[in-house]
Image (cartoon, helix red, strand yellow):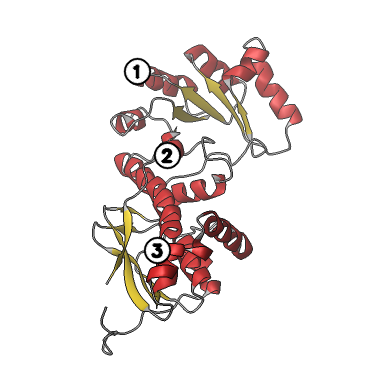
Amino acid sequence: MPDMEPNVPPPRRVTPLEMPAVAARDGLRFPLTRDQLVSRVREALEEDGAFNDVTTIATVRSDRRARAALVARQGGTIAGIPFALETFRMLDPKVSMRVDTEDGKRAMRGETVVYITGHARAMLSAERVALNFLMRLSGIASLTSRYVDAVRGTGVRILDTRKTTPGWRSLEKYAVRAGGGSNHRMDLASSVLIKDNHLAALDGQVEVAIKRARDLAPPATRVEIECVTVDQVAAAAAAGADIILLDNMPVELLRECVKVTARRAALEASGGVTLDNVRAIAGTGVDMISVGALTHSAPALNLALDFE
């Protein structure tokens, strides 16, 4: 590779203190502290043997410098930029990086997401880990944005679920927010969600379940209950549920439940939701639609690092 042209301005270096900030847009906040970010990245690099990359050490001179663009091979919404920046920085503390597409922004196919100048060895050894983080989280953000686009104009919010990768929940839910979606409860301690198996343990007594939740849960705790029939929905609304989850109901039944509740409770549709039917579900008058596929089945966004 020829020497760097003197008329090419170097990319602005993103410092460690700036890294969480590049993930902030319209209230979007990266969920990890600086120390947590460093720990996650170091663990991933160690797992990949990046500190002893025998191929790169054997073939690339230690003083070799390079420029590369991290580019989108397909269009999508980006999430996970702080991971990519920290990964390259950890192997080359003097690396220079220019962020062209921040978290929560969309990249068109062929567009540069991050432009990097630094030591070639470090860039080669960091490449896969940086891409793994970014492709996974951007995949979730991109799928979420497709659902959000599909219901745009209806006023319906797209929610995630607790169907997340163990240890990755805060990050995957962050990626959902980057894609324009909203988070359901973060964990079992966040709010009450009475599911079908809870009701089975109470012989199906909707009113009893809601009353016990009101009496024993911490004050101001949101109470949600899953219902599968119109009668259950009517009982839940009468008992004062804050949210009623309408599980695996066809569109016609969803409309009936909207009429029965008469806005006494917020309604969340869930189960069997796809990009093909989400608009029709939104048109029934429900307030929210939760989609487990956002986190458990999102394909990775195709990103790559191209050396100049």
Tally of numbered discs: 3
Q: Helix or strand or loop: what does disc 1 sit on? A: helix
- Residue 252, disc: 1
Relative image position of residue 97 (x, y in whole percent): 41, 74
Q: Which of marks 1 and 2 is nearer the N terminus?
A: 1
Q: Disc 2 marks which residue?
A: 294
Outermost residue toward the left in this view: 110
Q: Disc 3 marks which residue?
A: 102
Asked whether the viewer can see residue 258, the reply is yes
Outermost residue toward the top in this view: 203
Q: Quadrant of the C terminus?
A: bottom left
Q: Earlier in the sequence, mark 2 or mark 3?
A: 3
Asked whether the viewer can see residue 126, the reply is no
Is residue 219 positioned above or below 24 on the image? Answer: above
Q: Are marks 1 and 3 in contact (CB under 8 Å)?
A: no
Rendered image quadrant of residue 297? top left
Q: Closer to the camera, 146 or 41? A: 41
